[in-house]
Image (cartoon, rainbow, N blue to C red):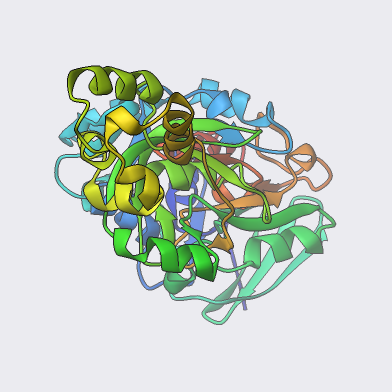
């Protein structure tokens, strides 16, 4: 037996729920299918449980895609201000943190409850704990979805399955497989917004620094960011490292400036004039944690009194701290990644409707698409915006 509905959304995450709400408002009969027992599991994990639900400074330049213009339409038609209006409608308290990031004062559950309340008002049906077994297209704008919990027919099919990040909560390649079934290309995938791992020799050298965090500029030929980095027992994490993982290629090096705010050579020369007997390491310890200085600066230089340290040696010290070059061995992978780089080719999708250009009635939203945002609420805003756009047309 096949149950008929008008819209089926595969995926009860951020973009799928937003799409369902908007389609329901248009009095479309909507069914959301998900493998999980409850909707919105990744939303609950966002922002360390406080849900970094958007950012004041959303801009297309904050996103990476093989088609960098693709996200512009959706982000301009459903903006961060539109989502804030929804948040305020539900009286959810929120605060701004660094760089325009907006978090719930309470927990991520507030945002999920808001979305589920909107779904309820819009008459959305859910089929959870379901495994998709097969999808067929008997005709144009006619799809059949077979699952282990029931079989359904619909006119519009939305793929909101997310990416490969966080497999522990059920991430899978289903969305890419569905795209392939309909001859829609997907770009190669990799983990994004993810900590770096280090080669054994670097890991051994830096192991005592685990837990230390400092502000730094991390850069390569593609990008540069000034933010916090955190040394871990496996490598480098913190906002700067996570952000740079979006722009890093395996085998390539990163340059890290551990003292981005000062001219270290001149600072050391000034200290030499005032306190010539002081050792280099004691001066550097005013700027950086002592353990970090001990590891990063050669001991013969660190132990020198300032008065016997040459200008050339000051430059060497500066290079060791302000031009530190490190080549990661890789990343922590999808296990801890917040997003998936790559995905369904945006050139095959309408930026206005999120509908596949060659398959009428088939839509893709959110992280399954080849759109990845910066750390700081950008990816959830993409989910809201892309889901909203599809919801106007399904």
* Location of residue 40 in the rendering, given as x and y in whole percent from the top left corner: 37, 58
Q: Residue at x 44, y 76 (%)?
A: 129
The relative height of residue 129 versus residue 31 in the rendered view (above or below) is below
- Residue 16 in sight here: yes
Q: Quadrant of the C terminus?
A: top right
179 with respect to 74 (left or right)? right
Q: Residue at x 19, y 31 (%)?
A: 277
Q: Quadrant of the N terminus?
A: bottom right
Q: Quadrant of residue 210?
A: bottom left
The relative height of residue 59 versus residue 331 in the rendered view (above or below) is above
336 with respect to 145 (left or right)? left
Q: Nearer the viewer, residue 4 or 333?
A: 333
Q: Looking at this view, name the residue that lies furthest to the front.
A: 308
Q: Nearer the viewer, residue 139 or 176?
A: 176
The relative height of residue 369 versus residue 335 in the rendered view (above or below) is above
* Location of residue 78 in the rendering, given as x and y in whole percent from the top left corner: 48, 26
Q: Residue at x 62, y 50 (%)?
A: 341
Q: Nearer the viewer, residue 155 or 98?
A: 98
Q: Looking at this view, name the residue that lies furthest to the bottom.
A: 148
- Residue 25 in sight here: no
Q: Nearer the viewer, residue 200 or 373?
A: 200
The relative height of residue 257 versus residue 250 in the rendered view (above or below) is above
39 with respect to 142 (left or right)? left
* Location of residue 388 in the rendering, given as x and y in whole percent from the top left corner: 50, 36
């Amino acid at each position: 037996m096949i149950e008929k509905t008008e819209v089926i959304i595969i995926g009860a995450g951020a973009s799928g729920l937003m799409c369902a709400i908007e389609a329901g408002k248009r009095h479309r009969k909507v069914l959301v299918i998900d493998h999980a027992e409850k909707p919105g599991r990744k939303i609950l994990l966002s922002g360390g449980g406080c849900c970094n639900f958007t950012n004041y400074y959303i801009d297309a330049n904050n996103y990476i895609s093989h088609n960098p213009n693709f996200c512009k339409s959706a982000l301009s038609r459903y903006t961060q201000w539109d989502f804030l209006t929804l948040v305020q409608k539900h009286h959810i308290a929120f605060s701004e943190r660094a760089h325009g990031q907006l978090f719930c004062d309470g927990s991520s559950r507030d945002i999920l409850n808001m979305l589920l309340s909107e779904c309820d008002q819009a008459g959305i049906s859910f089929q959870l704990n379901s495994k998709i077994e097969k999808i067929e297209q008997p005709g144009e704008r006619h799809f059949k979805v077979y699952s282990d919990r029931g079989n359904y027919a619909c006119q519009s099919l939305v793929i909101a399955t997310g990416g490969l990040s966080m497999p522990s909560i059920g991430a899978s390649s289903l969305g890419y497989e569905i795209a392939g079934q309909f001859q829609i290309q997907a770009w190669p995938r990799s983990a994004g917004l993810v900590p770096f791992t280090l080669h054994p020799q670097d890991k051994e050298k830096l192991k005592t620094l685990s837990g230390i965090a400092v502000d730094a500029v991390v850069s390569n030929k593609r990008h540069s960011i000034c933010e916090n980095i955190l040394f871990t027992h496996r490598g480098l994490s913190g906002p700067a490292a996570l952000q740079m993982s979006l722009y890093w290629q395996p085998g390539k090096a990163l340059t890290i400036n551990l003292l981005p705010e000062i001219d270290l050579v001149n600072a050391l020369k000034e200290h030499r004039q005032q306190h010539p007997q002081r050792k280099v390491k004691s001066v550097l310890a005013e700027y950086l944690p002592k353990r970090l200085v001990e590891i990063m600066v050669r001991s013969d230089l660190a132990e020198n009194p300032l008065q016997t340290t040459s200008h050339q040696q000051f430059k060497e010290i500066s290079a060791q701290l302000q031009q530190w070059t490190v080549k990661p061995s890789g990343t922590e992978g999808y296990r801890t990644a917040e997003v998936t780089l790559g995905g369904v080719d945006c050139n095959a999708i309408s930026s206005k409707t999120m509908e596949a250009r060659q398959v009428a009635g088939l839509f893709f939203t959110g992280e399954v698409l080849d759109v990845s945002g910066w750390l700081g609420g950008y990816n959830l805003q993409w989910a809201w915006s892309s889901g909203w756009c599809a919801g106007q047309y399904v």
